[in-house]
Amino acid sequence: MAGKIRQMIDSVIAQRAMGNPMLEKIIKTKMILKGVNPNKFTLQSDDDPGVLEKLERMLTELSYLSQDPANAASSELGESFGARDQTTAAPTVKKIDRSDIIAVCSTKDTIDEIANDISGQLALFDTKLLLFFSSSRFAPDEISRKMQDALPSSMVFGCSTSGEIVTGKMLDDSIVAMGFNDQSLIDAKIEIIEDIKDQSGVKKAFDSFAGHFGESVAEMNPKDFVGIILVDGLSGAEERIIETIGDLTNVVFIGGSAGDDLKFTSTHLYANGKSYSNAAILALLKPGTDFTFVKTQSFCDLGKSLHVTKADKENRVVLEFNGKPAAVAYAEAVGTSVEEAPNRFMHNPVGLFIEDEPYVRSPQQIMDNGSMAFYCGVGEGMELSLLESTDIIDDTRNAITRAKEELGSISGIINFNCILRKLELKQKNLTKEYGDIFSAASTIGFSTYGEQYIGHINQTATMLVFK
């Protein structure tokens, strides 16, 4: 039989995008990242059973989305604030004062000193929600408890890092935090997926969101809601979680994978005054102002294609490119030996191009059998392009300028910046110049072990930008 795949693709896009061109683009991107490229199928295309199975799962998720939010369960683990009765909730405020989002940091030596320093800087600010990123040098249980105790009436969450970013600076061994008041944030709810292997974790969190906000995630307007996702950076589970999120809602979740200052032993998430590993935090926000997203990766296409002919996507391993051992094909494309190829990983990753936009997959190591391990899942059939690094400073500055032109002004930025970008900036002595880009608006961020925006990606900065 032919043509069923095309019909199912059209059905998914029609039901999810509802005629919105921007949503249609996002949904097509999600499909391609899941290994289903809508541009490759027509009504005459043969029906691949593997592709049909993926599309059937997407349609199954759509049936879940149509359930009545009134029946959704509320999680005991979640935290929230704001009016639950949406019939009387205040209307979204589209213009806020710059002082309604505040970024602070502390480089004190002890946890007590840092908690006191952060709370002191926020003493005159009515903090409804505090997002913080912390160096891994601090004991995880203690730092989470002390940060929550310092702001007992606020929602407080965050994660460990491999370096921090705050307004005008790149830092190490510090804690950075961003506070929102009731002008900049109308409502919010936080959910913790305590076991990242729990296949139903995202659905449980979304049921709780629906119960709190009074509407299903399928009905939420992506212009009014935004999600933040923080994930254990050593779990290897980001793809599954972000793909499940993408199946369940058109609301964009953006975020990063927690770090541990390149020790690669354990990363931590913070919420409820507790620390979590092998877990994920999902926060759904209803901001009091407009917002947009920045995805910038600072690479150009070298015009050399690497077709994934054999892969173990679950374990992020590519066995073959172009029918050859992956390491051999990669080395040939770069123009070096297999032995020297790892020295080119940082400056020459590969990317999946979607509408002329690369979604980067960074090589991690060459295995004994000539296969290549990546920091991101790579599926069979993907057509990847060899990339070359360009100017991170100019690229990032231009991306922020475009975001400002779109919004008219910027009051706050949350920056999830890949650790490999930080290492390249350090290698080139450009960390000060990078920090300077964010001197005009309240900013926090951290160096991540992976970035989330529509999908899971590498060597990218994904940013949530508030007007």
Image: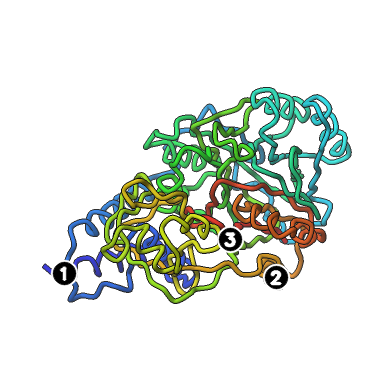
Residue beneath label 2, please? 394
Residue beneath label 3, please? 223
Instruction: Please state the horizontal and vertical placement of residue 230, each as a whole percent of the image.
Output: 56, 42
Determine whether 151 is above or below 168 in the image.
Answer: above
Which of discs 2 and 1 lies nearer the camera? The answer is 2
Residue 400 location, quadrant: bottom right
Instruction: Please state the horizontal and vertical placement of residue 293, each as a whole percent of the image.
Output: 61, 61
Between the residue at mark 2 and the residue at mark 1, the CA separation in whole angstroms equals 45 Å
Between the residue at mark 2 and the residue at mark 3, the CA separation in whole angstroms equals 29 Å
Residue 300 location, quadrant: bottom right
Residue beneath label 1, please? 46
Instruction: Please state the horizontal and vertical placement of residue 363, each as a whole percent of the image.
Output: 46, 54
Which of discs 2 and 3 lies nearer the camera? The answer is 2
Q: Is residue 14 visible?
A: no
Q: Type of residue at label 3?
A: Lys
> Alpha-carbon neighbours of circle 2 within 10 Å: few (<14), some, or many (≥20)?
few
Circles 2 and 1 in contact, beta carbons < 8 Å: no
Residue 307 location, quadrant: bottom left
Q: Residue at x 43, y 51 (%)?
A: 374
- Taking the view exactly as shown, the residue that stands out farthest to the left is 1
Q: Secondary structure at mark 1?
A: loop
Looking at the rendering, in which quadrant would you find the N terminus? Answer: bottom left
Between the residue at mark 3 and the residue at mark 1, the CA separation in whole angstroms equals 38 Å
Instruction: Please state the horizontal and vertical placement of residue 128, each as a whole percent of the image.
Output: 73, 39
Q: Secondary structure at mark 2?
A: helix
Q: Nearer the viewer, residue 121 or 365?
A: 365
Determine whether 144 is above or below 290 in the image.
Answer: above
Disc nearer the start of the sequence (2/1): 1
Q: Residue at x 50, y 58 (%)?
A: 345
Q: Type of residue at label 1?
A: Asp
Q: Secondary structure at mark 3?
A: loop
> Alpha-carbon neighbours of circle 1 within 10 Å: few (<14), some, or many (≥20)?
some
